């Protein structure tokens, strides 16, 4: 019985020794081996052999691309505007010993480094530039942290700005500014429309006045021509009457008297007439009636 127990103990010891000496590293990982508390080597994916009881697996490092979510933070721009921003960084560990021995916690270190660099970069920019220059911020941020993380055996693949927006108070101020700008543009457009309408109205009035003046000028010309024609006709009639009468006064007197009597008769027949017309030379007229 004691021999059997000893055999089982030896068998268990052999199995444990084999288990400790043979290590299978999965794909996507690298294991850091320490021998007697000191870095010894790095195990690559696959089958690996170590010295049992002397070599220990100190760290299991993920070699796939790692995404680090950078928490949101308030950043003050060059023109003293407060904006909220957060990011995400993609890194890859290419040298596991440096990653585990060069920094106590590379995830926290890179997160703090990105936040600090982001504050510094945006702090040198105005609000409008910061809101519209994501690609520029991304490139400058990657350039700023690449040298620092390279000393830790880490490569920064890219840093993406997830969100960058003004604070709630700044958003309200920007909305008010945008509303004021829209109102100003609307007022300018309305004023320009009224100005154009006034110009068109003035031009229309000017053209109408010119046409009216031309019409009045044409009417005046025609009226003058008509008066000239009438004057010529009157002159011709007077000339013919004068030639017909000659030195005889009686026919002329007769004609004038006939027109005078017709005019008096017409005025007397009017319903609105309240005048009684008498000849200017009434005494001679009466004498004429009695043949004296």
Image (cartoon, rainbow, N blue to C red):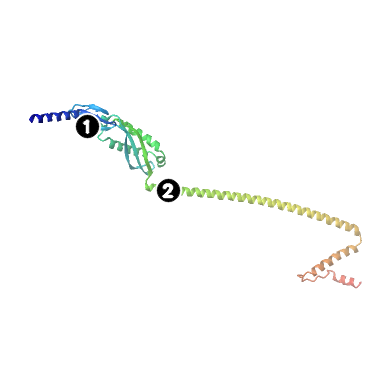
Mark 2 or mark 1: whose residue is earlier in sequence: 1
Task: Give the quadrant of the C terminus.
Answer: bottom right
Relative vertical location of residue 198 with respect to residue 124 in this rendering, above or below: below
Q: Is residue 265 left or right of residue 219?
A: right
Task: Decide if residue 148 is in sight here.
Answer: no
Q: Could you say where residue 247 lies in the image, as x and y percent from the top left?
A: 91, 60
Q: How crowded is mark 2: few (under 14 residues within 10 Å), some or many (20 or more)?
A: few
Q: Identify the image quadrant of residue 112.
A: top left
Of residue 133 and residue 59, the one placed in the foreground of this image is: 59
Of residue 158 and residue 260, the one placed in the foreground of this image is: 158
Q: Distance between the residues labelled 2 and 1?
A: 56 Å
Relative vertical location of residue 1 with respect to residue 180 in this rendering, above or below: above
Q: What element carries label 2?
A: helix
Task: Give the quadrant of the N terminus.
Answer: top left
What number is the disc on residue 39?
none
Q: Could you say where residue 144 lies in the image, as x and y percent from the top left?
A: 34, 33
Residue under the point 61% across and 50% down:
202
Q: Mark 1 points at which residue?
A: 58
Residue under the point 66% across and 51% down:
208
Q: Residues within 10 Å of mark 1 (few under 14, many from 20)?
A: some
Q: Could you say where residue 28 lies in the image, as x and y percent from the top left?
A: 29, 31
Residue under the point 41% across and 48% down:
173
Task: Decide if residue 207 is in sight here.
Answer: yes
Q: Name the residue under label 2.
A: 175
Marker count (numbered): 2
Q: What element carries label 1?
A: strand
Of residue 204 and residue 263, the one placed in the foreground of this image is: 204
């Amino acid at each position: 019985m004691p021999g059997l127990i000893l055999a089982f103990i030896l068998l268990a010891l052999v199995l444990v020794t084999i288990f400790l000496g043979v290590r299978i590293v999965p794909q996507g990982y690298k294991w850091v081996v320490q021998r007697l508390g000191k870095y010894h080597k790095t195990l690559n994916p696959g089958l690996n052999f170590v010295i049992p009881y002397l070599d220990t697996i100190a760290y299991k490092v993920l070699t796939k691309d790692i995404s680090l979510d950078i928490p949101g933070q308030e950043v003050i721009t060059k023109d003293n505007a407060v904006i909220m921003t957060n990011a995400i960084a993609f890194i890859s560990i290419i040298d596991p010993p440096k990653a585990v021995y060069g920094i106590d916690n590379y995830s926290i270190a890179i997160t703090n480094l990105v936040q600090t660099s982001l504050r510094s970069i945006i702090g040198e920019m105005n609000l409008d530039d910061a809101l519209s220059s994501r690609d520029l911020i991304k490139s400058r941020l990657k350039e700023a942290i690449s040298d620092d993380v390279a000393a830790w055996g880490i490569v920064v693949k890219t840093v993406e700005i997830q969100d960058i927006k003004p604070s709630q108070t700044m958003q309200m101020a920007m909305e008010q500014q945008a509303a004021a700008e829209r109102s100003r543009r609307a007022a300018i457009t309305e004023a320009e429309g009224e100005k154009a309408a006034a110009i068109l109205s003035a031009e229309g009035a000017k053209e109408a006045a010119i046409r009216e003046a031309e019409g009045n000028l044409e009417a005046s010309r025609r009226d003058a021509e008509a008066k000239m024609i009438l004057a010529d006709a009157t002159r011709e009639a007077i000339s013919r009457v004068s030639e017909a009468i000659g030195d005889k006064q009686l026919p002329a007197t007769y004609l004038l008297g006939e027109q005078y009597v017709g005019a008096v008769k017409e005025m007397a027949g009017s319903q609105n007439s309240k005048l009684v017309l008498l000849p200017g030379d009434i005494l001679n007229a009466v004498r004429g009636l009695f043949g004296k």
